[in-house]
Amino acid sequence: MPLQPLLPRRLYRQIAEQLRALIEHGEFPAGTRLPPERDLAVQLGVSRPSVREALIALEVEGRVEVRMGSGIYVREAPVRAAAVEHEAESPLETIRARALIEGELAAVAARQMKRAQISGLREAIALMVQESAAGQMPTQGDRLFHTRIAEASENSVLLRVVSGLFDERHNPLFAQLGSHFETARSWAAAIEEHKAVVDAIAHQDPAAAREAMVRHLANSHERFMASWQAEGETPAKPPARKKRVTT
């Protein structure tokens, strides 16, 4: 058998593999509610965001079911598990990366953007409002907003990076995560955060623009980390014995 190239396994995949193995070995039978994310994170020695992404990966595979307000429940083993993109980027890591990059780009935009370019940002927000009012996910206007800020840097590499990171929202994990947490209310909050970014850029205040963009993306991260289990509830079965992921 010829040697195959080795690919680094993303942390959420390692966590998903451990949880899948526990399910397959009967630690968590079908119908069982899994322990809360915070408990799994402690047992595995990883962060809650990584656990959440692992659970979303298992949901995409059909191994578990997310019941908002209740928790994560094990499903009957699928006849054939859905294929998961093994190279899909971590949604929450992507948002954190965007905060680092786009915060600085917003500061640059505050120094360099012309009046017409700022009008272009407001047009992008107006498109988001229009899409949302039509009952659509306002991703077209959202993408336009973020790429227009990147364009102000006059750096094609940075524009390509921002575009690529934004388009990660179409990967199966990000799409599944969004299906639980992206709502008309969450998008309304995001639109207001976009307006704060534009206000800072229009006032040519780089520090305020950076802060507004970082705050917007941090809030986006927190929206995706909202609780999906009622606070104070205990799992239907005692947590499995501690198993640590090697990082």
Image: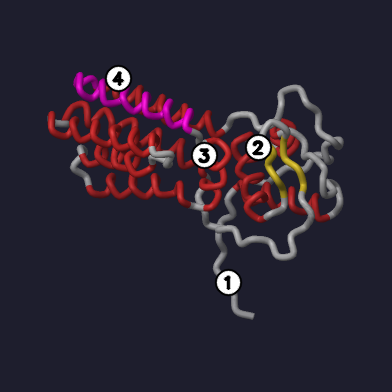
Residue drawn at x 32%, y 22% as measured from the top left: 196
Magenta run includes residue 136 = no
Q: Nearer the viewer, mark 3 or mark 2?
A: 3
* Residue 159 spot, x, y in % from top left: 27, 46
Residue drawn at x 85%, y 47% as measured from the top left: 27
Q: Amino acid at mark 1?
A: Gln
Magenta stretch? Answer: 184-205
Disc with the residue nearer the chain's start (2 vs 1):
1
Read off the residue under disc 3: 92
Q: Amino acid at mark 3?
A: Leu
Read off the residue under disc 2: 46
* Residue 237 spot, x, y in % from top left: 86, 37
Q: Is residue 76 above or below residue 208?
A: below
Q: Amino acid at mark 4?
A: Ala
Q: Nearer the viewer, mark 2 or mark 4?
A: 4
> Quick one: quadrant of the N terminus?
bottom right
Disc with the residue nearer the chain's start (4 vs 1):
1
Read off the residue under disc 1: 4
Disc with the residue nearer the chain's start (1 vs 3):
1
